Image (cartoon, grey):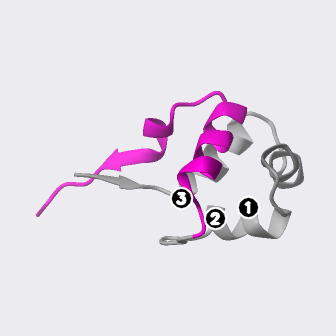
Amino acid sequence: MKQFQFSKIKEYREAAGMGQKDLAEKIGVSPQQLWNWENSSNDKSLTTEYLGKIATTLKKRTDDFFVEQRNI
């Protein structure tokens, strides 16, 4: 089963050489909201619309933010 990894937002943003403020402005949220998402494990305010905007801005697929979770 795949699970969303909020930390991927920060990882991909930094890899793109973009600051929080820059990405936040491009997707239409406050830098604080973006920080909340990057440091969350279960923030319900990240909608598919915002995820799509983040992915497009960072030149990623939405699937790139999900990782396979192994059942032990």
Query: Mark 1 near mark 2, Cβ–Cβ under 8 Å?
Result: yes
- Camera-side residue: 34 or 14? 34
**Residue tagged 3:** 6
**Residue tagged 2:** 37
How far across and how far down the image is residue 14, in percent? 73, 43
Dot 2 alpha-carbon crowd within 10 angstroms: few under 14, some 14 to 19, many 20 or more: many
Name the residue: 88% across, 46% down: 22
* 1 with respect to 38 (left or right): left
Dot 1 alpha-carbon crowd within 10 angstroms: few under 14, some 14 to 19, many 20 or more: many
Query: Mark 2 near mark 3, Cβ–Cβ under 8 Å?
Result: yes
Region in magenta: 45-72
Give above or below for 47 relative to 61.
below
Point out which mark residue 34 bears. Answer: 1
Secondary element under disc 1, as helix, strand or loop, is: helix
Q: Quadrant of residue 40?
A: bottom right
- Circle 1: residue type: Leu
How far across and how far down the image is residue 64, in percent? 47, 37
Q: Quadrant of residue 70?
A: bottom left
Cα separation, mark 2 vs mark 3, equals 6 Å
- Camera-side residue: 2 or 19? 2
How far across and how far down the image is residue 5, in percent? 46, 56
Q: Is residue 30 magenta?
A: no
Secondary element under disc 2, as helix, strand or loop, is: helix
Marked residue nearer the N-terminal end (2 or 3): 3
Cα separation, mark 1 vs mark 2, equals 5 Å
